[in-house]
Image: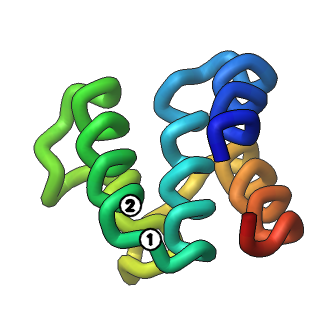
Amino acid sequence: MVAFGAAARKGLGDPVLAELVMIRASQINECAFCLDMHVDVAVEKNGRARSGSRCSMPGARPGVVHSERERAALALTDAGGPC
């Protein structure tokens, strides 16, 4: 997961998008601790309240609209499966 996170941060170039990927990976791995941690980091980097952030639960909140780039990053994360 450390290597995955480093690759996401380096390859994506957008710290919020990198956290969104880490949030999805935490969901896939069913790690509540990591999920909570990455949501907090993403919200901090995004500058929004946690309840209003689209980073809080990607794919789990109805009405959340992700950009094409975000959808691609999430799909790539989904394709990787559990770490």
Q: Residues within 10 Å of mark 1 (few under 14, many from 20)?
A: few
- Residue 3 position in % (x across, y down): 74, 34
Q: Residue at x 79, y 64 (%)?
A: 75
Amino acid type indicated by mark 2: Leu
Residue 19 numbered tag: none
Seen at 70% across and 58% down, the residue is 74
Q: Which residue is mark 1?
A: 31
Residue drawn at the location 12% of the way across and 44% of the way down: 49
Left or right: where 64 falls relative to 80: left
Q: Are marks 2 and 1 in contact (CB under 8 Å)?
A: yes
Pinpoint residue 8: horizontal percent, then vertical percent: 71, 33
Q: Is residue 26 above or below residue 38?
A: below
Mark in the foreground, 2 or 1: 1
Secondary structure of the residue carrying tag 1 is loop
Q: Quadrant of the C terminus?
A: bottom right
> Horizontally, is 76 left or right of 51 in the view?
right
Residue type at the position of mark 1: Cys
Tell me residue 12's x, y (percent): 73, 26
Left or right: residue 46 compared with residue 20: left
Could you say which quadrant of the image residue 69 lies in? top right
Residue position marked by numbered label 2 in the rendering = 35
Question: Residue at 38% across / 67% down in the picture?
Answer: 57
